[in-house]
Amino acid sequence: MSGDTLSSAPTPAGVLVVDKDKGFTSMDVCAIVRTRFRRGGAPKRLKVGHAGTLDPMATGVLVVLVGKATRLSDRMMLGEKEYLAEVDLSRRSDTDDVEGRVEDVAVANPPDEAAVRAALAGFVGEIMQKPPAFSALKVGGKRSYDLARAGKAVELAARPVVIHECRLEAYAWPLAKVWVRCGKGTYIRSLARDVGTALGCGGMLTALRRTRVGAWTEAMARRIDTLPDVMTQADLRDVTE
């Protein structure tokens, strides 16, 4: 009989660290993983989730949780995260990244490298950060991005987040490459926007890569196109690794 309908094997449980490609949503990845485990005999209703969303434009570490490991999602999201971001200081967007409605910002005197470094330093520590209007947060029971796409005004309250480090890796106007180590709930899109505001210019993400989630790093990650078509328990890491 088909592995989708009957299997004597125990339900798989554990962690799969995926190097997400651009264009995929986090739930796209979960759906792909679920399908491949079902081919290996897992139940149709196998639970598959993730420990922290990555936007479609972003790449990098997505921690996928399978089976009983999905119960650990909240705990795993408490871990630090690291990102490498590219910020365009000459443009703004309604989504705070290149995927939205973009507009140029006239900047008479572009900031020099010292000014950009100083601005980044001002966001280190516990700060109040306003999430992007186009985010998965709920407003009155509805996703903020659904309201924003429908043309409704969305005003999300600022909330405390922690940025442990925020370092300029490279700069050539208008692009700044920034490395960030931060806590749960930090929006790198919001950081790009707010750094630009602090500098008196534009500020939006043009690229984002997550390189670490807690103990899970990009060195551990596997691209979707390298995963087997049929997956079993042997393809998972134990949550205690």
Image: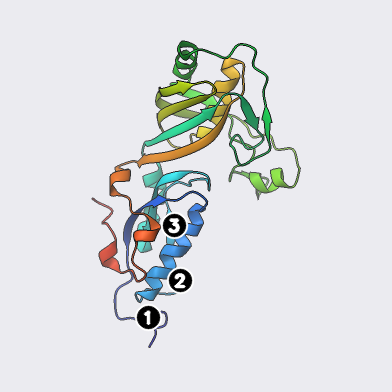
- Numbered disc 3: secondary structure: strand
Which residue is nearer to you in this view: 87 or 49?
Answer: 87
Visible in this render: residue 29? yes
User: Does residue 86 sit above or below 234 in this rendering?
Assistant: above
**Is residue 12 positioned above or below 154 on the image?**
below
Picture quarter containing residue 33?
bottom left
Judge left or right: residue 225 versus residue 88. left
Q: Of tags 3 and 1, which is closer to the observer?
A: 1
**For the residue marked with disc 2, what is the amino acid?**
Arg
Tell me the distance, in whole angstroms, between the alpha carbons under discs 3 and 2.
12 Å
Q: Which mark is residue 3?
A: 1
Q: Is residue 217 visible?
A: no
Kind of residue at disc 1: Gly
Which amino acid type is shown beneath numbered disc 3? Gly
Check disc 3 and report the residue beneath it: 49
Residue 236 percent across, percent down from the top left = 29, 60
The percent position of residue 11, horizontal first and vertical second, equals 33, 71
Residues 178 and 50: in front is: 178
Residue denoted by label 2: 45
Instruction: Where is residue 114? Give x, y as percent.
Output: 45, 11
